Image: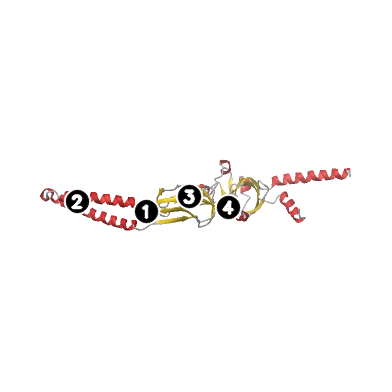
């Protein structure tokens, strides 16, 4: 019995060493986290924006209304500007008409024609603007994707220009794994390679390499919800698809873990435990 216990102890030590050494030899990244792309939401028209009561981090569904923009306020301001400019042009024209025609001469005639043309142009602009103002111009702004409200650029009653960014949504339907590796490992990887993402709480998620992004470009980083830390940008970026992440209703953005780029001893042990039902 004593020898059996010693043999089992030696076997346990050998297995532990095998697992530790084997896990160190497989390609892996200890700097990985769940990331997602951002959907930027812009206002289609100029006007006053009214945001829905959504807090940062709130869940939104695709096509859910997040804001409304009304152009009536800006149209009223523009109408007043046109009416003022028209009044000034008329006053200048009338003042010139009141002068003595002989004293004004040819230059006075040219100036009179110019002012008359300006009055006509301003009158047309004012009429067009009054017609536009008579319509209740507004637009509902919806989220194009499901996800989390990541930022809100404009608050209620803010005046915005057409095309202005008012919010951004982190796309839960495009969640992926963002890993940083050294150059030696990076050069051994290929798009389509299988991998595993082991979260800090022990969960294992199957993944596939979708992009070998190297050291850039910066434009890629700007489209992501979570920017990597300075230490991570010094390495080589690898992005991995993991279908289980997009199916997770919790949308675990920012969850950290480790990516294993080849099956190590722990994966073999896990398969054996699954086989025996443990």
In the image, 185 versus 269, the foreground residue is: 269
Whole-number angstrom distance, CA of label 1 to CA of label 4: 39 Å
> Which comes before the other along the chain, label 4 or label 2?
2
> Which comes before the other along the chain, label 3 or label 2?
2
**Residue 175, disc:** 4
Tell me whether the residue at label 3 lies in contact with that at label 1, contact meaning CB atoms closer than 8 angstroms.
no
Q: Tell me what residue is drawn at x 50 percent, y 47 percent.
A: 151
Residue 132: quarter of image: bottom left
> Which comes before the other along the chain, label 3 or label 1?
1
Here the colouring is secondary structure
In the image, 51 versus 247, the foreground residue is: 51
Tell me whether the residue at label 3 lies in contact with that at label 4, contact meaning CB atoms closer than 8 angstroms.
no
Mark 1, mark 4: which one is toward the viewer? 1
Mark 3, mark 1: which one is toward the viewer? 1
Q: Residue furthest right?
A: 1
In the image, 246 versus 135, the foreground residue is: 135
Mark 2, mark 1: which one is toward the viewer? 1
Tell me whether the residue at label 1 lies in contact with that at label 4, contact meaning CB atoms closer than 8 angstroms.
no
């Amino acid at each position: 019995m004593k020898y059996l216990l010693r043999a089992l102890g030696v076997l346990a030590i050998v297995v532990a060493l095998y697992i530790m050494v084997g896990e160190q030899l497989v390609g892996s990244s200890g700097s990985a986290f769940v990331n997602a792309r951002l959907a930027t939401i812009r206002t289609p028209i100029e006007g006053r924006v009214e945001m829905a009561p959504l807090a940062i981090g709130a869940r939104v569904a695709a096509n859910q209304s997040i804001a409304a923009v009304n152009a009536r306020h800006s149209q009223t301001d523009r109408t007043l500007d046109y009416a003022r400019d028209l009044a000034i042009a008329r006053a200048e024209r009338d003042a010139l008409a009141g002068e003595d025609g002989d004293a004004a001469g040819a230059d006075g005639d040219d100036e009179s024609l110019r002012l008359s043309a300006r009055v006509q142009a301003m009158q047309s602009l004012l009429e067009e603007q009054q017609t536009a103002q008579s319509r209740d111009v507004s637009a509902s702004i919806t989220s194009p994707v499901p996800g989390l409200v990541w930022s809100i650029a404009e608050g209620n009653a803010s005046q915005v220009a057409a095309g202005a960014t008012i919010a951004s949504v982190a796309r839960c339907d495009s969640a992926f794994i963002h890993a940083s590796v050294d150059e030696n490992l990076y050069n051994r990887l290929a798009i389509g390679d299988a991998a595993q993402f082991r979260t800090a709480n022990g969960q294992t998620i199957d993944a596939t390499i979708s992009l070998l992004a190297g050291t850039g470009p910066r434009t890629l980083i700007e489209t992501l919800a979570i920017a990597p830390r300075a230490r991570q940008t010094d390495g080589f970026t690898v992005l991995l698809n993991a279908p289980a992440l997009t199916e997770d209703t919790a949308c675990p953005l920012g969850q950290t873990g480790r990516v294993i780029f080849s099956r190590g001893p722990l994966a073999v042990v896990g398969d054996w435990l699954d086989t025996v039902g443990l």
